[in-house]
Image (cartoon, rainbow, N blue to C red):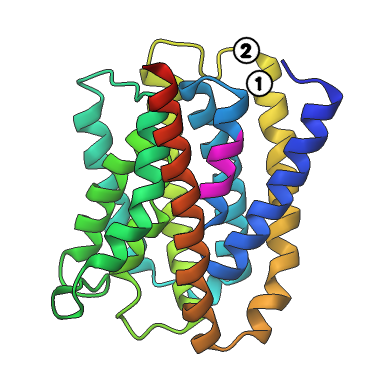
Amino acid sequence: MFSLSVLAALAAVAVVTSFISGVFGMAGGMLLIGFLLFLLPVPVAMVFHGVIQIAANGWRAWLWRHHVKWSVVLKFGAGSAASLLVFSWFDFVPDEALVLMMVGLMPFIALAVPQRIAPDIERGGQAFLAGAIGGAIQLVAGVTGPILDIFYVRTGMTRQVNVSTKAAAMVLGHLTKVAYFGVLIEGPAGRDLEQWLVMAYAAAFAVLGTTLSRSFLDRMSDRQFYYWTRRVILALGAVYVAQGIWLMVTRW
Protein backbone atom coordinates (compact mmCIF):
# COMPACT_ATOMS: atom_id res chain seq x y z
CA MET A 1 0.00 0.00 0.00
CA PHE A 2 2.80 2.44 0.90
CA SER A 3 5.50 2.45 -1.77
CA LEU A 4 8.50 4.79 -1.58
CA SER A 5 6.84 7.20 -3.98
CA VAL A 6 3.67 7.27 -1.86
CA LEU A 7 5.69 7.83 1.30
CA ALA A 8 7.59 10.69 -0.34
CA ALA A 9 4.34 12.27 -1.54
CA LEU A 10 2.79 11.85 1.92
CA ALA A 11 5.77 13.60 3.54
CA ALA A 12 5.56 16.50 1.09
CA VAL A 13 1.79 16.86 1.53
CA ALA A 14 2.10 16.72 5.33
CA VAL A 15 4.69 19.54 5.30
CA VAL A 16 2.78 21.74 2.84
CA THR A 17 -0.67 21.30 4.39
CA SER A 18 0.54 21.84 7.95
CA PHE A 19 2.43 24.93 6.79
CA ILE A 20 -0.75 26.32 5.20
CA SER A 21 -2.77 25.60 8.34
CA GLY A 22 -0.04 27.16 10.45
CA VAL A 23 -0.30 30.40 8.51
CA PHE A 24 -4.08 30.59 7.98
CA GLY A 25 -5.42 28.44 10.82
CA MET A 26 -7.27 26.28 8.25
CA ALA A 27 -7.28 25.08 4.61
CA GLY A 28 -4.39 22.64 5.08
CA GLY A 29 -6.74 20.01 6.45
CA MET A 30 -8.95 20.36 3.38
CA LEU A 31 -6.01 19.66 1.09
CA LEU A 32 -4.80 16.77 3.21
CA ILE A 33 -8.14 14.93 3.29
CA GLY A 34 -8.40 15.20 -0.49
CA PHE A 35 -4.97 13.60 -0.92
CA LEU A 36 -5.71 10.82 1.59
CA LEU A 37 -9.08 9.98 0.02
CA PHE A 38 -7.26 9.47 -3.28
CA LEU A 39 -5.04 6.81 -1.65
CA LEU A 40 -7.12 5.16 1.06
CA PRO A 41 -10.64 3.95 1.94
CA VAL A 42 -12.70 6.55 3.81
CA PRO A 43 -12.33 5.08 7.35
CA VAL A 44 -8.55 4.68 7.00
CA ALA A 45 -8.22 8.15 5.44
CA MET A 46 -10.14 9.61 8.38
CA VAL A 47 -7.78 8.02 10.92
CA PHE A 48 -4.69 9.10 8.98
CA HIS A 49 -6.06 12.61 8.68
CA GLY A 50 -6.89 12.73 12.38
CA VAL A 51 -3.45 11.60 13.55
CA ILE A 52 -1.57 13.95 11.20
CA GLN A 53 -3.80 16.87 12.16
CA ILE A 54 -3.44 16.13 15.89
CA ALA A 55 0.34 16.39 15.44
CA ALA A 56 0.14 19.61 13.40
CA ASN A 57 -2.50 21.30 15.55
CA GLY A 58 -0.96 20.13 18.80
CA TRP A 59 2.43 21.52 17.87
CA ARG A 60 0.87 24.76 16.63
CA ALA A 61 -0.99 25.17 19.92
CA TRP A 62 2.26 24.56 21.80
CA LEU A 63 4.19 27.13 19.75
CA TRP A 64 1.50 29.75 20.50
CA ARG A 65 0.52 28.36 23.92
CA HIS A 66 0.63 31.76 25.63
CA HIS A 67 -2.18 32.96 23.31
CA VAL A 68 -4.59 30.02 23.76
CA LYS A 69 -7.99 30.77 25.34
CA TRP A 70 -8.40 27.57 27.33
CA SER A 71 -11.97 28.27 28.43
CA VAL A 72 -13.01 28.13 24.77
CA VAL A 73 -11.00 24.95 24.15
CA LEU A 74 -12.52 23.05 27.08
CA LYS A 75 -16.11 23.93 26.10
CA PHE A 76 -15.38 23.00 22.49
CA GLY A 77 -13.98 19.64 23.61
CA ALA A 78 -17.12 18.91 25.62
CA GLY A 79 -19.25 19.60 22.55
CA SER A 80 -17.09 17.31 20.40
CA ALA A 81 -17.38 14.52 22.97
CA ALA A 82 -21.17 14.87 22.92
CA SER A 83 -21.21 14.40 19.13
CA LEU A 84 -18.96 11.34 19.41
CA LEU A 85 -21.36 9.81 21.94
CA VAL A 86 -24.31 10.32 19.60
CA PHE A 87 -22.53 9.01 16.47
CA SER A 88 -21.22 5.94 18.31
CA TRP A 89 -24.78 4.61 18.33
CA PHE A 90 -25.08 4.63 14.53
CA ASP A 91 -21.83 3.07 13.24
CA PHE A 92 -21.96 5.48 10.27
CA VAL A 93 -19.28 5.54 7.55
CA PRO A 94 -19.72 8.32 4.94
CA ASP A 95 -19.45 7.85 1.20
CA GLU A 96 -16.38 9.38 -0.49
CA ALA A 97 -18.48 11.63 -2.76
CA LEU A 98 -20.41 12.88 0.28
CA VAL A 99 -17.15 13.69 2.07
CA LEU A 100 -15.82 15.67 -0.90
CA MET A 101 -19.08 17.59 -1.30
CA MET A 102 -19.30 18.41 2.42
CA VAL A 103 -15.69 19.57 2.55
CA GLY A 104 -16.17 21.74 -0.53
CA LEU A 105 -19.45 23.34 0.55
CA MET A 106 -18.37 24.23 4.09
CA PRO A 107 -16.48 27.46 3.21
CA PHE A 108 -19.45 28.77 1.22
CA ILE A 109 -21.88 27.91 4.03
CA ALA A 110 -19.62 29.62 6.55
CA LEU A 111 -19.36 32.85 4.57
CA ALA A 112 -23.09 32.90 3.79
CA VAL A 113 -23.99 33.50 7.44
CA PRO A 114 -25.14 37.16 7.76
CA GLN A 115 -23.00 39.48 9.86
CA ARG A 116 -25.87 40.33 12.22
CA ILE A 117 -26.44 36.71 13.30
CA ALA A 118 -22.85 35.47 13.11
CA PRO A 119 -21.89 33.54 16.27
CA ASP A 120 -19.02 34.40 18.60
CA ILE A 121 -16.92 31.58 20.09
CA GLU A 122 -16.21 33.66 23.20
CA ARG A 123 -19.86 34.22 24.16
CA GLY A 124 -21.93 32.02 26.46
CA GLY A 125 -22.23 28.39 25.42
CA GLN A 126 -21.27 28.96 21.81
CA ALA A 127 -17.94 27.17 22.19
CA PHE A 128 -19.87 24.04 23.24
CA LEU A 129 -22.23 24.50 20.28
CA ALA A 130 -19.25 24.88 17.94
CA GLY A 131 -17.77 21.67 19.33
CA ALA A 132 -21.02 19.76 18.89
CA ILE A 133 -21.54 20.98 15.32
CA GLY A 134 -17.87 20.56 14.47
CA GLY A 135 -17.76 17.09 16.00
CA ALA A 136 -20.69 15.94 13.87
CA ILE A 137 -19.24 17.37 10.67
CA GLN A 138 -15.82 15.99 11.60
CA LEU A 139 -17.23 12.46 11.53
CA VAL A 140 -18.97 13.03 8.18
CA ALA A 141 -16.55 15.23 6.22
CA GLY A 142 -13.28 14.81 8.14
CA VAL A 143 -12.57 18.56 8.37
CA THR A 144 -14.42 21.38 10.11
CA GLY A 145 -12.17 24.43 9.90
CA PRO A 146 -14.18 26.44 7.34
CA ILE A 147 -17.56 26.00 9.04
CA LEU A 148 -16.08 26.69 12.48
CA ASP A 149 -14.47 29.87 11.20
CA ILE A 150 -17.85 31.62 11.52
CA PHE A 151 -17.43 31.30 15.30
CA TYR A 152 -14.01 33.00 15.18
CA VAL A 153 -14.05 35.75 12.57
CA ARG A 154 -16.19 38.28 14.49
CA THR A 155 -14.53 37.85 17.90
CA GLY A 156 -11.88 40.54 17.62
CA MET A 157 -9.17 37.95 18.34
CA THR A 158 -5.67 38.66 17.08
CA ARG A 159 -4.37 36.23 14.47
CA GLN A 160 -2.18 34.52 17.12
CA VAL A 161 -5.10 33.98 19.51
CA ASN A 162 -7.30 32.83 16.61
CA VAL A 163 -4.81 30.30 15.27
CA SER A 164 -3.65 28.96 18.65
CA THR A 165 -7.11 28.61 20.21
CA LYS A 166 -8.52 26.95 17.11
CA ALA A 167 -5.52 24.60 16.95
CA ALA A 168 -5.93 23.49 20.57
CA ALA A 169 -9.66 22.97 20.06
CA MET A 170 -9.11 21.00 16.88
CA VAL A 171 -6.77 18.59 18.66
CA LEU A 172 -9.80 17.52 20.70
CA GLY A 173 -11.98 17.45 17.58
CA HIS A 174 -9.57 15.20 15.68
CA LEU A 175 -9.21 12.93 18.72
CA THR A 176 -12.93 12.18 18.49
CA LYS A 177 -12.53 11.29 14.79
CA VAL A 178 -9.61 8.93 15.47
CA ALA A 179 -11.55 7.30 18.31
CA TYR A 180 -14.62 6.87 16.11
CA PHE A 181 -13.02 5.49 12.95
CA GLY A 182 -10.04 3.80 14.61
CA VAL A 183 -11.74 2.19 17.60
CA LEU A 184 -15.55 2.31 17.50
CA ILE A 185 -16.12 1.53 13.81
CA GLU A 186 -15.64 -2.10 12.79
CA GLY A 187 -13.52 -1.74 9.69
CA PRO A 188 -10.00 -1.42 8.24
CA ALA A 189 -9.08 1.86 9.99
CA GLY A 190 -5.79 1.71 11.87
CA ARG A 191 -5.90 -2.07 12.35
CA ASP A 192 -2.25 -2.92 11.68
CA LEU A 193 1.19 -1.76 12.77
CA GLU A 194 2.24 -0.56 9.31
CA GLN A 195 -0.55 2.01 9.21
CA TRP A 196 0.41 3.44 12.61
CA LEU A 197 4.09 3.62 11.68
CA VAL A 198 3.25 5.51 8.49
CA MET A 199 0.96 7.84 10.45
CA ALA A 200 3.78 8.58 12.90
CA TYR A 201 6.11 9.23 9.96
CA ALA A 202 3.64 11.68 8.39
CA ALA A 203 2.97 13.34 11.75
CA ALA A 204 6.67 14.16 12.10
CA PHE A 205 6.60 16.02 8.77
CA ALA A 206 3.41 17.81 9.87
CA VAL A 207 5.31 19.13 12.90
CA LEU A 208 8.06 20.35 10.56
CA GLY A 209 5.59 22.22 8.35
CA THR A 210 3.95 23.80 11.40
CA THR A 211 7.33 24.97 12.71
CA LEU A 212 8.20 26.57 9.36
CA SER A 213 4.89 28.47 9.33
CA ARG A 214 5.53 30.40 12.53
CA SER A 215 7.75 33.12 11.04
CA PHE A 216 5.23 33.73 8.23
CA LEU A 217 2.37 34.23 10.68
CA ASP A 218 4.53 36.64 12.69
CA ARG A 219 5.16 38.78 9.62
CA MET A 220 1.50 38.96 8.54
CA SER A 221 -0.90 41.60 9.77
CA ASP A 222 -4.33 40.68 11.15
CA ARG A 223 -5.90 42.27 8.06
CA GLN A 224 -3.79 40.18 5.67
CA PHE A 225 -4.56 37.06 7.71
CA TYR A 226 -8.34 37.39 7.37
CA TYR A 227 -8.15 38.62 3.75
CA TRP A 228 -6.20 35.64 2.44
CA THR A 229 -7.96 33.05 4.58
CA ARG A 230 -11.26 33.69 2.82
CA ARG A 231 -9.81 33.40 -0.65
CA VAL A 232 -7.80 30.25 -0.01
CA ILE A 233 -10.67 28.26 1.48
CA LEU A 234 -13.16 29.34 -1.19
CA ALA A 235 -10.79 28.25 -3.95
CA LEU A 236 -10.26 24.85 -2.32
CA GLY A 237 -13.98 24.50 -1.66
CA ALA A 238 -14.79 25.00 -5.33
CA VAL A 239 -12.29 22.31 -6.31
CA TYR A 240 -13.74 19.74 -3.90
CA VAL A 241 -17.34 20.44 -4.90
CA ALA A 242 -16.32 19.82 -8.51
CA GLN A 243 -14.58 16.58 -7.53
CA GLY A 244 -17.60 15.37 -5.57
CA ILE A 245 -19.94 16.11 -8.46
CA TRP A 246 -17.62 14.38 -10.93
CA LEU A 247 -17.45 11.27 -8.75
CA MET A 248 -21.23 11.12 -8.47
CA VAL A 249 -21.71 11.64 -12.23
CA THR A 250 -19.22 8.93 -13.18
CA ARG A 251 -21.09 6.43 -11.02
CA TRP A 252 -24.33 6.87 -12.96
Labelled pair 1, 2 in contact (Cβ < 8 Å): yes
| Residue on which the image places disc 2 | 192
| Residue 99 pos. (x, y %) | 39, 34
Judged left or right of residue 39, residue 121 is left
Q: Is residue 26 visible?
A: no
| Residue on which the image places disc 1 | 195
Q: Is residue 111 visible?
A: yes
The quadrant of the picture occupied by the N terminus is top right
Q: Looking at this view, is 112 or 135 the one in front? A: 112
Q: Residues within 10 Å of mark 2 (few under 14, many from 20)?
A: few
* 40 vs 241: above or below: above
| Residue 242 pos. (x, y %) | 45, 42
Q: Quadrant of residue 184?
A: top left
Prevailing secondary structure of the magenta residues: helix
Q: Which mark is residue 86?
A: none
Judged left or right of residue 223, residue 2 is right
Q: Looking at this view, is 235 or 155 the one in front? A: 235
Q: Amino acid at mark 2?
A: Asp
Q: Residues within 10 Å of mark 1 (few under 14, many from 20)?
A: some
Q: Residue at point 66% right, 31% down?
A: 199
The quadrant of the picture occupied by the C terminus is top left
Q: What segment carries the magenta color?
A: 30-35
Q: Residue at point 25% right, 62% down?
A: 127
Q: Looking at this view, is 1 or 76 the one in front? A: 1
Instruction: State the separation of the CA atoms marked 1 and 2.
Output: 6 Å
Q: Secondary structure at mark 2?
A: loop
- Residue 43 is one of the magenta-drawn residues: no
Q: Amino acid at mark 1?
A: Gln
| Residue 202 pos. (x, y %) | 71, 38
- Residue 31 is one of the magenta-drawn residues: yes
